[in-house]
């Protein structure tokens, strides 16, 4: 079963749930997952992290690991 079918199956199942406690548990799980995503990807970096990222970026640039804007745009177009 592909991911789209799994999502639809989950939506169907969830739409039929009548148990309030089960819905609260699902809501708590969703909130926890969103918090984890925020912490992993969206939380502002501290000074040490920023310095490390700048150093890594500079090393990548010096080593020639760069892409033009056109190359980046093409990669995003190919993902769709």
Image (cartoon, rainbow, N blue to C red):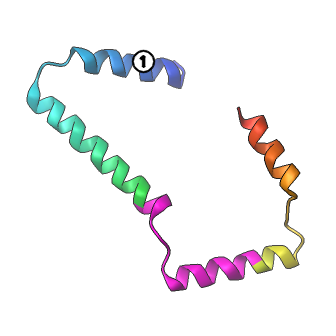
Q: Is residue 26 magenta?
A: no
In the rendered image of this protein, does residue 58 appear above or below residue 8?
below
The reply, left or right, for residue 31 in relation to residue 52 is: left
Q: Is residue 61 above or below residue 66?
A: below
Which residue is at a point 11% across and 23% down the rendered structure image?
19
Point out the image quarter for the C terminus.
Answer: top right
Check disc 1 and report its element: helix, strand or loop. helix
Residue for badge 1: 8
Q: Is residue 37 left or right of residue 73?
A: left
The one nearer the camera, 23 or 42, is: 42
Q: Residue 22 at what x, y percent from top left? A: 15, 30
Residue span colored magenta: 39-57
**Looking at the picture, how far across and down is residue 66, in whole percent?**
85, 65
Magenta stretch encompasses residue 44: yes
Which residue shows up at 52% across the image and 25% down it? Answer: 3
Number of labels in the image equals 1
Residue at (61%, 84%) from the top-left corner? 51
* Residue 21 screen position, x and y as percent: 9, 32
Q: Quadrant of residue 14?
A: top left
The image shows residue 6 at horizontal and vertical percentages of: 45, 21
Which residue occupies 86% across, 50% down? 71
Left or right side of 78 for 42: left
Crowd rating for badge 1 (residues with CA inside 10 Å; few <14, some 14–19, many 20+)? few
Is 12 rendered above or below residue 39?
above
Which quadrant would residue 7 be assigned to in this image? top left
Q: Main secondary structure of the magenta part?
A: helix
């Amino acid at each position: 079963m592909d991911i789209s079918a799994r999502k639809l199956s989950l939506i169907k199942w969830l739409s039929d749930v009548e148990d309030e406690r089960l819905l609260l548990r699902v809501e708590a799980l969703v909130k926890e997952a969103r918090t984890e995503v925020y912490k992993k990807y969206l939380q502002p970096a501290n000074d040490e992290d920023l310095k490390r990222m700048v150093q890594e970026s500079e090393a990548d640039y010096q080593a020639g690991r760069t892409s033009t804007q056109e190359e980046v745009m093409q990669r995003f177009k190919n993902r769709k």
